[in-house]
Image (cartoon, grey):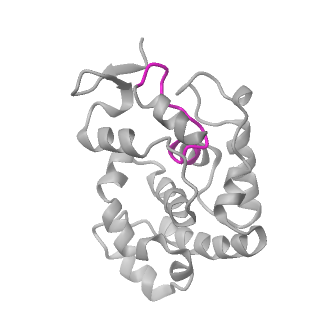
Amino acid sequence: MSQTLPGPDGRPRCRWCVGTPEYLAYHDTEWGFPVRDDRRLFEKLCLEGFQSGLSWRTILTKRENFRAAFHNFDFDKVAAFGEADVARLLNDAGIVRHRGKIEAVINNARRAKELVQKEGSLSDYVWRFQPRPEELGAPQTQSTSPASVALSKDLKKRGWKFVGPTTVFAFMQAMGLINDHAEGCIIRAEAEKGRK
């Protein structure tokens, strides 16, 4: 079975993205393109945690609500959240109202501040875990890698929550640490150019 399907313009794209317009736009403009901005990296780690057990479409359609609720994922601001903020977020129908995941974002914001103090930036830290090509199988054939396991373990050791190896692998795919666009996908070469 081919890993690509024709998009609305007839050009091949990763199979997973052609079923819904939200996925198509996300695939063509964001997924797999390298990100070095600390706020965007933190946002994506948080959203991947919220996605655990749900579809990415659910999170993607609520992304602007998440951004509003969590001050655009500015981890300095989120780190200051208290119990009143947790209560506010649990009543916010625009996001996923899961106490453990909400509290994990606040915890992880505090851990992100600590990490930046020690490592210089979230970006410098995360990109040290970029997997070597030989660690990866063919595109879209795995849900973890030795690098995602290592990053997950290190984040957990530093006190982060909702950062298991599968969640971290999805984060690495989305943020361009891995170019997991299918062979033959029209975006694969663009993402690779960005990685260089």
Q: Is residue 22 left or right of residue 104?
A: left
Q: Is residue 120 left or right of residue 164?
A: right
Indicate whether residue 182 is drawn in magenta: yes
Choose between 88 and 61: the one closer to the eye. 61
**Does the magenta stretch mainly form a helix, a strand or a loop?**
loop
Camera sees residue 55: no
Vertical order, 176 against 113 (above or below): above
Vertical order, 128 against 83 (above or below): above
Indicate the position of residue 83 as horizontal and vertical percent values: 49, 86
Camera sees residue 195: yes
User: In what quadrant of the picture does the N terminus appear?
Assistant: top left
Indicate the position of residue 74 as horizontal and vertical percent values: 50, 74
User: In what quadrant of the picture does the C terminus appear?
Assistant: top right
* Quadrant of the image occupied by residue 116: bottom right
Q: Which residues are magenta?
A: 171-185
Q: Is residue 126 left or right of residue 180?
A: right
Vertical order, 18 against 184 (above or below): below
